[in-house]
Amino acid sequence: MSDSQMICLRVEKISQYVLEQVYAHNLRLMDVPNADPNKREKNRRWTYSTGSKSTKQLVEERLREYPELRIQKNSVVANEVILTTSNEFFHNKSDSDLELWIQANLDWLKKRFGKNLLEVNYHADETSPHFHCIVTGLKEKVKTKRRTKAQIASNSPGIKYKVMSLCANEVFNRESLSKLQCEYANAMKPFGLKRGLKKSGSKHTTVKEYHAKTAELTKVKKQLKNTTESLEIKEKELLKKSEEIRVAKRKLAYIQQRAKDILEACFEPLRRAFEFASSNLNHQALRLISDSLKEYDNNKEEIKRLLPQERIQEVDGYVMPMRNSLK
């Protein structure tokens, strides 16, 4: 196992206005470009409450337990804790090994956040399996009542009392997050996972940034696919043209051979007859020329179609004297 396998824990603040979007993403009710639909059935969901309540319903139900809470429009009503580890960790993992890791994460979450843990979504349909956990920032605070005149006169302290408050910035501040990283790393030690360097200066990519990069990657992959398909089409066109050129060359070779055959069959006998008649001008020679000219005339149109112009002129240079000799 590589020493570079590390835990990853991130926290995102959630206002009441984005609860429905968080639920839609976690339950795959919206399009998630980097999720594989074929693996969606492996996803899981746990909630502290029975039934199939939405994230918004779970949060509102939990907050209603404390009517004294003062919730503003822009209040952070919950936090999303994202847990995962190096992608290499999941290579060649058996189902039983993976199940042990999943259960260890659930046990730690329940122990660490208690009643504040409202929902856990396990996603196995992305490159690296991970958890999206909805945690409220409820914290018990001790307050002091304003002192009465009698208490002031007697220099007595005010009466202390406890209240529940939404304190996202106190529950998940810089110091508590660093402690949380260490606690999670300790829980994952049995799996050979460890914490990254403290104050290393590295920054986590936010969920929004991650999905933006994923969308950009999807866009680039699509462009690459389109370019590849375009190149394949052009290659096919080139192969088609190459085939057309090959066929054209074969056709040209056939035409050239055909022209040669016609010349040998029609013109060459005519030329030889004329040469014979030139030295033996008699009735038999003239008849041979006449028959050969008729054979030539019968194929004249095809000869003109097949032969280049200069070759036709060359042939006519032989044929014309032959015709004149018959006059």
Image (tube, grey):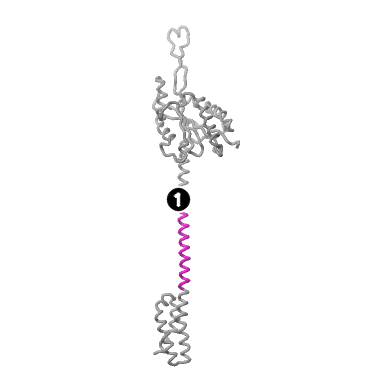
Which residue lies at the image location 46% right of the left edge and 16% below the top edge?
162
Q: Which residue is mark 1?
A: 226
Residue type at mark 1? Asn
Counting from the top left corner in percent of width and height, residue 308 is at 44, 75
Magenta residues (range): 227-255
Position of the C terminus, as image quadrant, is bottom left
Pick the residue in front: 313 or 250. 250
Counting from the top left corner in percent of width and height, residue 182 is at 56, 28
Counting from the top left corner in percent of width and height, residue 131 is at 49, 33
Q: Is residue 323 above or below residue 14?
A: below
Which residue lies at the image location 41% right of the left edge and 76% below the top edge?
302
Say which element carries label 1.
helix
Main SS category, magenta section? helix
In the image, residue 131 lies in the stretch drawn in magenta: no
Counting from the top left corner in percent of width and height, residue 210 is at 48, 38
Position of the N terminus, as image quadrant, is top right
Q: Residue furthest front?
A: 96
Pick the residue in front: 53 or 5. 53
In the image, residue 242 lies in the stretch drawn in magenta: yes
Q: Is residue 152 above or below residue 250?
A: above
Which residue lies at the image location 47% right of the left edge and 60% below the top edge?
239
Q: Is residue 261 above or below residue 273?
A: above
Q: Is residue 36 above or below residue 311?
A: above
Which residue lies at the image location 44% right of the left edge and 21% below the top edge?
165
Q: Residues within 10 Å of mark 1 (few under 14, many from 20)?
A: few
